[in-house]
Amino acid sequence: PPLEDLQAPYAFYHKSLFDFLDDISRSGPFYLGYRLRSDFVCEKYMAVVRDKCFKLGEADQSLLSRYFHFRLFPPAPFYMTGPSMSDFDLPAANVEWWVRATAFHRNSQSLDYAFNGVHASCQWFRCTPLCKRWQSIILRVCRSENWQVPSAVRLLLIRFNKSKHTPFYPPQNTRNLCSCRQNVL
């Protein structure tokens, strides 16, 4: 679509582009294996979360923020191969920014992945400080925005690794999301 058309979706019409990019014998110096692509995406993703913004002009930032939440938040980066848990050791303000941005875009799957992803390296008898920080911020922000969060029993089961599913549901009334807008991209 034309550059000024921010509504029209992008589409690839030729599968041969993907075949070219995935085949080292065809793409030669342009080839990037899955691991390198994953690491690159995770590195850029975490840079945005660390900086709490995109380093772009105002118009580009608006466009990219919609893409960022739509495309990258779902499973990335918590179940990708790139980052280690130390990459998520961010100040509470950065974690809160990410949670508010995710809640604003009503992305319950990302909150679920994050909540479980940071807990994955915990021992059954003790959560890491990183896990405690992320989970407490996710719960606090979601409650403040009237999201449905896991019950106390579900949280206990999650703590002892007896449950992997964390149900986060956005509020039915979209007006509850207004307080997020000022702190989001």
Image: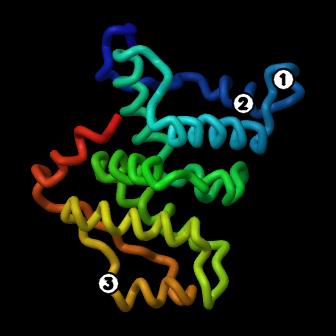
Q: Which mark is residue 26?
A: 1
Whether residue 33 sits left or right of residue 16 in the image: it is right
Residues at discs 1 and 2 in contact (Cβ within 8 Å): yes
| Neighbour tally class for label 3: few under 14, some 14-19, many 20 plus, Cα within 10 Å | few
Q: Nearer the viewer, residue 84 or 36?
A: 84
Instruction: Name the residue: 47% across, 25% down.
Output: 11
Q: Position of residue 158 (x, y in %)?
A: 49, 83
| Residue topped by disc 3 | 151
- Residue flagged by tag 2: what amino acid is it? Asp
In the image, is 33 to the left or to the right of 37?
Answer: right
Q: Which sits earlier in the primary sequence, circle 1 or circle 3?
A: 1
State the SS at label 3: loop
Q: Nearer the viewer, mark 3 or mark 2?
A: 3
User: Looking at the image, which is closer to me, 12 or 4?
Assistant: 4
Please rate how many residues cluster around mark 2, counting C-alpha atoms within 10 Å: few if below 14, some from 14 to 19, many from 20: few
Mark toward the start of the polypeptide (1 vs 2): 2
Q: Secondary structure at mark 2?
A: helix
Please give the label number shown on residue 67: none
Residue at position x 36%, y 73% in the image: 167
Q: Is residue 87 above or below residue 59?
A: below
Counting from the top left corner in percent of width and height, residue 144 is at 22, 63
Residue at image coords 58%, 42%: 46
Instruction: Give the percent coordinates (x, y) of residue 33.
Output: 80, 38
Q: Are marks 3 and 2 in contact (CB under 8 Å)?
A: no
> Which residue is labeled 2 in the image?
19
